[in-house]
Image (cartoon, rainbow, N blue to C red):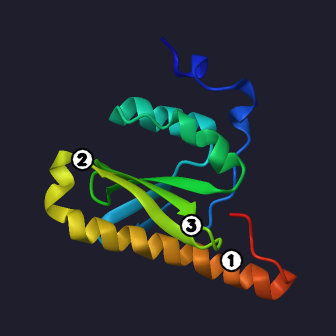
Amino acid sequence: MSVHLFVPRCSEKAWSSAVPETELGDFRFVPLDTAQAIADEALATGVPLIGRIASCRRGEARCYSIRAAAGGERLALLELERDGKGAWKPRRLKAAAAAARADLALRLAASWLAVQYAKRDALAGLGEGVGGAG
């Protein structure tokens, strides 16, 4: 069965990501910034992510695939969500069994990503008087 059967047709539009595809140390962050990217990652990892599309479109969440910088192996899935005060927090971090030994490093990398979103929101607040939507 094709992936497109699971993804709404209006999903082609990408939502903004504060951090584009980026390497940090041993990790590469790949933003899942379209419904199709989320569907592809769900199929590749077996983790149900399709239900996250609506919150990403609304700017309430962002999803990233964390991969090995060398080789591109999928290590973890990260979801950033806004807390009650609007701050970005890493909420879900699903690590592959092969990445268990790097769990602390993955958590630190996830925190770094959340900080990048906070910086972007702070800059947007200075420039516009209002925090960014993500």
Q: Secondary structure at mark 1?
A: helix
For marks 1 and 3, give the one nearer the viewer.
1
Q: Amino acid at mark 2?
A: Ala
Q: Amino acid at mark 3?
A: Val
Q: Secondary structure at mark 2?
A: loop
Labels 2 and 1: the sequence-earlier one: 2
Q: Is residue 67 above or below residue 22?
A: above
User: From the viewer's perspective, is 33 left or right of 59?
Assistant: left
Q: CA distance from mark 1 to mark 3?
A: 12 Å
Q: Residue at x 61, y 37 (%)?
A: 35
In x, y percent, where is residue 73? 28, 48
Asked if residue 87 shows in the view, the reply is yes
- In the drawing, what numbered circle is on residue 96? 2
Labels 1 and 3: the sequence-earlier one: 3
Q: CA distance from mark 3 to mark 2?
A: 22 Å
Q: Nearer the viewer, residue 33 or 133?
A: 133
In x, y percent, where is residue 46? 35, 31
Q: CA distance from mark 2 to mark 1?
A: 30 Å
Q: Is the C-beta separation of discs 1 and 3 under 8 Å?
A: no
Please tell me in which quadrant of the rendered image residue 42 appears.
Answer: top left
What residue is pinned by disc 3? Answer: 19
What residue is pinned by disc 1? Answer: 121
How packed is label 1: few (under 14 Cα within 10 Å), some, or many (20 or more)? many
Q: Is residue 19 above or below residue 12?
A: below
Please tell me in which quadrant of the rendered image residue 106 appears.
Answer: bottom left
How packed is label 2: few (under 14 Cα within 10 Å), some, or many (20 or more)? some
Q: Is residue 107 above or below residue 34?
A: below
Q: Amino acid at mark 1?
A: Asp
Labels 3 and 2: the sequence-earlier one: 3
